Image (tube, rainbow, N blue to C red):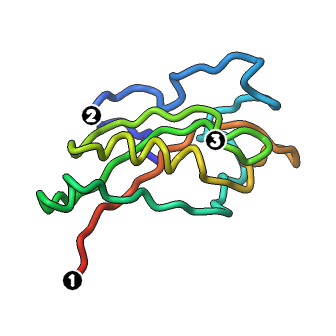
Amino acid sequence: VVGKLGNTLATDIDTLTATEKELKGTLEPVTTVQKLPRIKVQIKPEYTKAMLENEIQGVIKAKILIDVDGRVKQTVVLNDLGYGSKQRVYEACQKLEFEPAMQNGRAVAVWFIISFRFEITQ
């Protein structure tokens, strides 16, 4: 989770908003929760044909809104390796499932940053 002074933007990490109809619970800053969300179902984005042909490797970060039910409600892909990688990360994020973040014994919604590594193994 990136949120310290000295990051590229030096801004709060919880700056995106969601409407009440999109959330089942209360939205809290990830820096204030007592227990961070924990991944239950991990999905790895698949390489596109163009990524494989061009031997693209690297890391893509996405900011995801995890609701009290552990489902991803919104995804903002923060960077892109090209060749369709951004779309593949977006699709993978929508399939992730988490144990929700906890604050004072109750589940809360949080924005959370997750990284996906594209690596070609021989």
Asked if residue 39 is positioned above or below residue 60 in the image, the reply reads below
**In the depicted view, which residue is nearer to us: 44 or 1?**
44
Q: Residue at x 27, y 34 (%)?
A: 8
Give the amino acid type for the residue marked by disc 3 in the picture. Val
Disc 3 residue crowd, few under 14, some 14–19, many 20+, Cα 10 Å: many
Give the image quarter of residue 122: bottom left
What element does badge 1 sit on? loop
**Mark 1 or mark 2, whichever is nearer to me:** 1
Location of mark 3 (residue): 72
Residue 58, image x and y in percent?
23, 57
* Mark 1 or 2, nearer chain start: 2
Q: Is residue 121 left or right of residue 32?
A: left
Q: Which of marks 1 and 3 precedes in the sequence? A: 3
| Residue type at numbered disc 1 | Gln
Q: Which quarter of the picture shows residue 117?
A: bottom left
Q: Position of residue 12 (x, y in %)?
A: 47, 27
- Which sits in the foreground, 63 or 36? 63
3D distance between C-alphas at marks 1 and 2: 34 Å
Quarter of the rendering containing residue 20: top right
Residue furthest front as drawn: 49
Residue at the left extreme?
54
Determine crowd level at label 2: few under 14, some 14-19, many 20+ residues with C-alpha closer than 10 A. few
Label whose residue precedes the other's in the sequence (2 or 3): 2
Q: Label 3 to label 1, Cα distance in Å?
A: 32 Å
Residue at label 2?
8
What number is the disc on residue 122?
A: 1
User: Where is residue 111 drawn, in percent x and y?
Assistant: 58, 36
Q: Is residue 52 above or below residue 6?
A: below
Instruction: Specify the label residue 19 is tagged with.
Output: none
Q: Residue at x 29, y 39 (%)?
A: 79
